[in-house]
Image (cartoon, grey):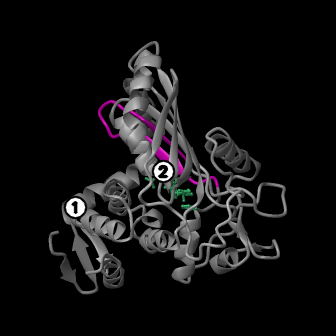
Amino acid sequence: MSAPHDHAHTSTLSVEALTQLLETIFLRHGVSAEAAGVLAANCANAERDGAHSHGVFRMPGYVSTLNSGWVNGKALPQVEDVASGFVRVDAGGGFAQPALAAARPLLVEKARSAGIAVLAIRNSHHFAALWPDVEPFAEDGLVALSVVNSMTCVVPHGADRPLFGTNPIAFAAPRAGGAPIVFDLATSAIAHGDVQIAARQGEKLPSGMGVDSLGQPTCDPKAILEGGALLPFGGHKGSALSMMVELLAAALTGGHFSFEFDWKNHPGAKTPWTGQLLIVIDPSKAAGQPFAERSQELVRQMHGVGLKRLPGDRRHLQRARSLAEGIALDAQTLAQLRELAGH
Ligand code: NDP
Ligand code: PYC
C-alpha cells in the first residue's frame, strides 16, 4: 500500500491503496477472498468517482452487518442456466456483486448468442451504487439495465405509510468515441445514504423529499430517519417506477420485497436482503447504423441544444481527478478505516 500524503487534515490515497485497505477490512470481518476483492473494488471505485453516498461512508455499515451475522460474507453463489436467455443466481445470503461476478461470463455468452439475456439474482444483499454493475457491460459494447430493491422507507404516491425501498435503476449504453452513457438513480426523491450524510453534517434537505413520523412534510433529515419516511421522485411517476423495481428485482427473481425481511434480531444489520435483476442486450443484432454511433449522434444533438452535463459526466471528471491526484480522505475517516482494518 502506498503511503498517504498528509495535507493538513486530509490524506491522499491512490485508488489501489484505498482498494487494498478496504479489502483488508472485508477479509478481517469474515468475507471470502473472492468477495472481498469484488466489494473493495466496488466501494473504492465509488469513492474514486465521487459517489460518496456509496463510497467509504458505507464501510462501518458493512462491518456492523457482517458482525451481526445478517449477511454471509463467505457465501458461494449458485449459478443456474435456466433458459437460452435466462440465468438465475442464488447468492446464498451473501452480497449481490460477487453473485453477478460469478454469473457474468454465462450472462454475456447468452446475451451475445440470443441477443438478449436476463440475470435474476436472489437471496442477495446490495449496499452499493448500481452503476458499477452496468457500466462494464457498456464498455464491452453491450446495453445493460439493472434494478435492485432495498428496504421499506418510501411512501408510495397516494399512500399513508412507507412500503417501497429506495429502489434504484441503472442503465448503460456504449457510445462511439466516448465513455458509455450511464445513469443511475434512486426512485426515491433522495437516496437514503444522502439523507444520512445530510443528518450527520447538520444540513437541511430541499422540500419534497420526505415526511416526519406524523406523515407531515419535513426538510429535517433526522426527522426522516427517526420514524419518518422518504417520498418517490416525481410523484406518481417515480412511484410507478419504484413499484416496477419491486416487481423485477424481487417478484421476478425470487428475492424479498423491500418489506419482506425482518432484521430486528440482528442489531447492526444495514444491508437490504432482497434481489436484483439485470437485462443485457447485444446491440450488434439491431438494424441500421451501429448502435454506438447512434448513441454518439444522440449525445451530439443533446449538446447541440445546449446540454452541458450528461449523467455520468460528473463521475468521469472526478474519476480522472482521482486517478491523477489520488483520493482525498479526511483524517477522521482514514483513522476509522484503519481501525476497522486492524492497523
Ligand atoms: P443522483 O440524483 O445524484 O444522480 C442520479 C443520476 O443523474 C446520475 O446518473 C447522475 O450522474 C445524474 N445527474 C445528477 N445531476 C445531474 C445533472 N444536473 N445533469 C445531468 N445528470 C445529472 O443519484 P441518486 O441520489 O438518485 O442515487 C445515488 C446512488 O445511490 C446511486 O448510485 C444509486 O444506485 C444508489 N442507491 C443504491 C441503493 C441500493 O439499494 N443499493 C438504493 C438507492 C440508491 P452523475 O453520477 O454523473 O452525477
Ligand atoms: O442509499 O437508499 C440508499 C441505499 C439503500 C441501500 C443501499 N443504499
Relative to residue 98, is residue 121 drawn left or right?
right
Q: Quadrant of the N terminus?
A: bottom left
Taking the spot 75% from the left edge, 58% from the top edge, the residue there is: 163
Relative to residue 212, is residue 132 drawn left or right?
left
Q: Earlier in the sequence, mark 2 or mark 1?
A: 1
Residue under numbered circle 2:
96
Taking the spot 40% from the left edge, 22% from the top edge, the residue there is: 112
Kind of residue sitting beneath label 2: Ala
Q: Residue furthest top?
A: 287
Q: Nearer the viewer, residue 194 or 314?
A: 194
Q: Quadrant of the C terminus?
A: bottom left
Ligand 2 is in which quadrant of the figure?
Answer: bottom right
Residue 175 is inside the magenta segment: yes
Residue under numbered circle 1:
16
Q: Residue furthest left?
A: 2
Q: Which residues are magenta?
A: 169-187
Q: Secondary structure at mark 1?
A: helix
The label nearer to you, 2 versus 1, is 2
Disc 1 packing (10 Å; few <14; some 14–19; many ≥20): some
Where 166 falls versus 12 (above or below)?
above
